[in-house]
Image (spheres, grey):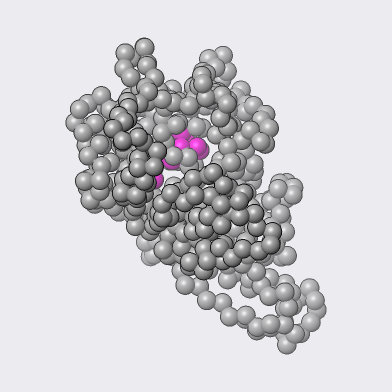
């Protein structure tokens, strides 16, 4: 609210007529666990008004800590659409609700529109697949890390807990000596790790949908979608690599994803169940059977709704991308300039049916043997020691884990040794 209020403060450089003629409505996204809840949306809403735009409706608020989709649907149905209809639809006009669909002549069925098409390369073997070189500006902004991350060898991987402890925490040391400037880091920066789906999950999905895991393909824009195409991930690649590295098969899908999957279900019971859980009335069932049960798209297509039939390009469009996981680096860049250490808590949760849901990235890392590789990149952090090393430091970890504490303590130790000064000059920890 303070940020939004600040956005309304005009100064002599503000053009209060810049957006005259523009009508707008903002739905803000956020999480109430964070201090500046929905701040960006609130600032945008306020700033557009200051610059002369016409606010159609009060800013909507979405809380990802509760039900983001439900918040949006409620705002859309009770605020946005009534406002737009009142403002822009003439009284008595009839709105056409029909949606265009793309015909799949081979299957004789109508499928949702898809922005991609798959070009299979039958003469290329998996070992011969080499990704095309693409320009930086042609890459999709949200998946740029797929193109820029670097494969680095793991030199050390060891379990930190005892055999009597049922949980697992792994210490890893990753060699970045050959990565060049792409992986230079500062103490307490974050390491982005690109996860890899479990082989069993990948094979189950491919088996259910009839995909050849060794087939090599190139992802291209579908006709009439060339003008807004951006490269999602490097291709040509194999179907196995696509499913393993670029498709989130284990994260619980949103209700809107279930509605889309229903379009591909050939069994009326499967279609009905998916549509029911995607509806407003099915929110409780969705929370119980999908969110609480840790059910991912892989489980749905391979176990629960086996009637789903999807061409590969449609699955790529419907399935969320597999996002990087970030770990606070647990080593000092001064002491270990050619090595990055991370401390990984291996996540596993027992489902209601007794099966185990495994954290996709932590289990991937735990399974990497020494001299195996991980695909990583660095992300800057604002988490820093005081510039004046004589200042004392109190470190409190309310759920942050040991990683940043280890890195900062290493850095303080290095400061004492490097500067050749007594402990009185470097502040207490």
- Tell me the quarter of the picture where residue 213 sits: top left
* Residue 373 visible: no
**Residue 210 rendering spot, x and y as whole percentages:** 37, 23
Horizontal relation, residue 309 to residue 127: left or right: left
Q: Which residues are magenta?
A: 243-253
Picture coordinates of residue 85, whole percent (x, y) = 35, 40
Image quarter of the C terminus? bottom right
Left or right, 241 with respect to 17, comes to left
Residue farthest front in this picture: 91
The verdict on residue 245 being magenta is yes
- Residue sitting farthest toward the left: 269
Magenta segment's dominant SS is: loop
Q: Is residue 105 magenta?
A: no
> Horizontally, is 376 left or right of 367 in the view?
right
Query: Where is 98 relative to 284, above or below?
Result: above
What is the quadrant of residue 270 in the picture?
top left
Name the residue at the bottom extreme: 424
Q: Residue at x 49, y 58 (%)?
A: 42
Q: Front-most of 299 and 347?
A: 299
- Judge left or right: residue 380 versus residue 180: left
Residue depicted at x 56% and y 40%: 143
Q: Nearer the viewer, residue 56 or 415?
A: 56
Q: Residue at x 64, y 26 (%)?
A: 132
**Whole-percent x, y for residue 294 in the image:** 32, 48
Residue at 34 percent of width and 57 percent of height:
66
Query: Does residue 366 sit above or below 119 in this rendering?
Result: below
């Amino acid at each position: 609210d303070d940020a939004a209020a600040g956005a309304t403060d005009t100064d002599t450089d503000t053009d209060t007529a810049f957006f005259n003629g523009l009508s707008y409505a903002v739905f803000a996204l956020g999480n109430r666990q964070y201090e500046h809840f929905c701040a960006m949306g609130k600032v945008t809403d306020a700033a557009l008004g200051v610059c002369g735009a016409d606010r159609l409706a009060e800013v909507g608020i979405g809380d990802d800590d509760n039900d983001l989709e439900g918040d949006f649907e409620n705002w859309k149905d009770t605020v946005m659409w009534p406002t737009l209809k009142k403002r822009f639809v003439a009284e008595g006009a009839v709105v056409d609700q029909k949606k265009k669909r793309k015909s799949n002549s081979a299957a004789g069925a109508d499928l949702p529109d898809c922005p991609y098409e798959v070009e299979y390369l039958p003469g290329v073997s998996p070992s011969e697949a080499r990704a095309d070189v693409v320009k930086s500006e042609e890459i999709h902004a949200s998946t740029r890390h797929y193109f820029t991350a670097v494969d680095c060898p793991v030199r050390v991987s060891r379990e930190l807990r005892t055999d009597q402890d049922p949980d697992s925490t792994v210490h890893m040391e990753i060699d970045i000596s050959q990565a060049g400037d792409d992986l230079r880091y500062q103490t307490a920066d974050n390491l982005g790790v690109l996860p890899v789906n479990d082989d069993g999950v990948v094979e189950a999905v491919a088996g259910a949908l009839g995909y050849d895991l060794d087939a090599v393909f190139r992802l291209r824009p579908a006709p009439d979608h060339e003008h807004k195409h951006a490269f999602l991930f490097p291709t040509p690649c194999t179907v196995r690599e696509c499913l393993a590295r670029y498709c989130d098969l284990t994260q619980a899908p949103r209700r809107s994803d279930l509605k889309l999957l229903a379009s591909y279900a050939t069994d009326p019971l499967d279609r009905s169940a998916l549509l029911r859980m995607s509806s407003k009335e099915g929110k409780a069932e969705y929370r119980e059977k999908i969110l609480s049960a840790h059910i991912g798209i892989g489980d749905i297509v391979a176990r629960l709704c086996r009637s789903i039939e999807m061409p590969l390009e449609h699955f790529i469009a419907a399935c969320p991308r597999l996002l990087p996981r970030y770990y606070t680096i647990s080593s000092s860049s001064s002491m270990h300039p050619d090595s990055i250490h991370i401390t990984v808590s291996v996540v596993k949760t027992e489902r209601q049916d007794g099966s185990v849901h495994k954290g996709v990235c932590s289990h991937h890392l735990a399974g990497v043997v020494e001299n195996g590789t991980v695909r990583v990149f660095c992300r800057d952090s604002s988490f820093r020691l005081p510039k004046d090393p004589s200042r004392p430091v109190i470190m409190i970890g309310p759920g942050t884990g040991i990683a940043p504490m280890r890195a900062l303590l290493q850095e303080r130790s290095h400061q004492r040794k490097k500067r050749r000064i007594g402990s009185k000059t470097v502040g207490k920890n």
